[in-house]
Image (cartoon, rainbow, N blue to C red):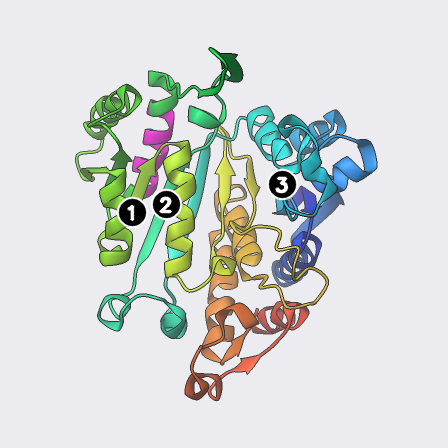
């Protein structure tokens, strides 16, 4: 097949890790007779430096015209970067919100898997990590607090701030349907996370989700309050299959889930709309402190590329090949610094390699 992929290298380590994902996709294309055409565009801090805004109309247009988007990391050091002296609507992260809205990317998929080879990097107790886990966090991405009306104002000599959390039935229903569809391909369990004991928006979320569940009799639906979900993720992560939740809760819980896998550098991500189109990116940040040092972990971006092959292009065999190659490299004892064992005995059993070497090793296994 032929596919046009827009690449947004982004900021910090973004260009380094996107380069390795492109390398792996080119290897897949070579092996299976596909052709992937890449076009790089700017967004985030790189776009601010070039154009004065974090997201241009040209970037949006090129993304819409592509078959899929592969993105690195956006943003910089909030304490030192001049980008963060700008008003919030002009900072790098505003580009993320803007492109999600422009492309209608309402469904964010974040798999969190504990690889057997990385069990030692998991911060949980051995009796918990030994059971392993494989979950998919389904986060609603274009509604809720992040997109509601907001204002900061003065009243009676005091500064006040308001953020509005709004969800409609249709917004909840479409993300719930996505979650149940994916659960049907997995272990047929959905845990819907909300704060229904306090928030009206969560009570509506629970009502609509329970309605959708009636169309999926094979799938077990479990409702869980978000504070309990945060606790259960570290107490017994193996219990989860698909976690369905709104925007802010999903943002927080997916980062927590990433860390119990051993490193956020292992966490891939896909953001989908109503069609096959998707934007694929690692869940981690731009890590400006290690940019240019060649030590960033590209695996999350490479696994995001595998998700692209599976969800946008229906190339399941190719996607599985990438995932198997990653597992083989880990089984062969190769690690970037973030997933190195902490104890000296463990370090003696593995070899630390750099960003480009990790991409090369995965290509070799392909």
Are there few (<14), some (14-19), or many (20+) residues within 10 Å of tag 3?
many
Label 1: how many residues lie within 10 Å, few (<14), some (14-19) or many (20+)? some
Q: Which mark, by number, is residue 253?
A: 2
Q: Is 178 inside the magenta-drawn segment?
A: yes
Residue visible at 80% across and 39% down in the picture: 49
Q: Are marks 2 and 1 in contact (CB under 8 Å)?
A: yes
Cα–Cα span, label 3 and label 2 = 24 Å
Residue marked by disc 3:
69
Residue 230: which disc?
1
Tell me which residue sits at (59%, 61%) in the image.
298
Question: Which numbered disc covers residue 39?
Answer: none
Choose top left, top right, bottom left or bottom right for residue 21: bottom right
Looking at the picture, does residue 305 appear above or below residue 144? below
Where is residue 286 shown, x and y percent of the image? 62, 51
Q: What residue range appears in magenta?
A: 173-182
Q: Position of residue 48 (x, y in %)?
A: 76, 36
**Residue 278 picture location, percent across and down:** 54, 37
What's the CA distance linking mark 3 and mark 1?
A: 31 Å
The image position of residue 218, as x and y in percent, is 18, 39
| Front residue of 336 and 359 | 336
User: Left or right of 229: which side holds 264?
Assistant: right
Q: Is residue 241 visible?
A: no
Task: Give the structural element (helix, strand or loop) at label 3.
Answer: strand
């Amino acid at each position: 097949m032929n596919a046009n992929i827009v690449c947004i290298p982004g900021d910090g380590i973004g260009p380094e890790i996107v380069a390795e994902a492109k390398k792996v996709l080119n290897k897949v294309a070579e092996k299976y007779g596909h052709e992937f055409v890449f076009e790089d565009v700017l967004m985030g801090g790189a776009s601010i430096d070039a154009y004065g805004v974090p997201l241009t109309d040209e970037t949006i247009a090129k993304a819409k015209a592509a078959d899929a988007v592969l993105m690195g990391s956006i943003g910089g050091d909030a304490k030192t970067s001049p980008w963060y002296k700008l008003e919030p609507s002009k900072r790098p992260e505003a580009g993320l919100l803007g492109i999600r809205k422009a492309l209608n990317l309402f469904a964010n998929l974040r798999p969190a898997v504990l690889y057997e080879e990385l069990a030692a990097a998991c911060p949980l107790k051995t009796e918990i990590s030994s059971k392993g886990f494989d979950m998919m966090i389904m986060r609603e991405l274009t509604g809720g607090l992040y997109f509601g009306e907001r204002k900061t104002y003065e009243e009676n000599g005091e500064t006040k701030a308001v953020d509005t959390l709004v969800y409609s039935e249709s917004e909840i229903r479409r993300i719930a349907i996505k979650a149940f569809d994916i659960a049907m391909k997995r272990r047929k369990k959905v845990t819907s996370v909300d704060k229904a004991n306090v928030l009206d928006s969560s009570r509506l979320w629970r009502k609509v989700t329970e309605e959708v569940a009636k169309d999926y009799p094979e799938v077990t639906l479990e409702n869980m309050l978000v504070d309990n979900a945060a606790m259960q993720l570290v107490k017994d992560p193996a219990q989860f299959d698909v976690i369905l939740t709104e925007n802010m809760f999903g943002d927080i819980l997916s980062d927590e889930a990433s860390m119990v896998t051993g490193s956020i550098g292992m966490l891939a991500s896909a953001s989908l709309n109503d069609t096959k189109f998707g934007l694929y990116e690692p869940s981690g940040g731009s890590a400006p402190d290690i940019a240019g040092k060649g030590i960033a972990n590209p695996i999350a971006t490479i696994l995001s590329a595998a998700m692209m092959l599976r969800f946008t292009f229906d190339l399941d065999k190719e996607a599985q090949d990438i995932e198997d190659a990653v597992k083989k490299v880990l089984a062969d004892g190769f690690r970037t610094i973030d997933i190195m064992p902490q104890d000296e005995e463990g370090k003696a059993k593995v070899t630390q390699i750099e960003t480009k070497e990790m991409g090369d090793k995965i290509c070799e296994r392909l």
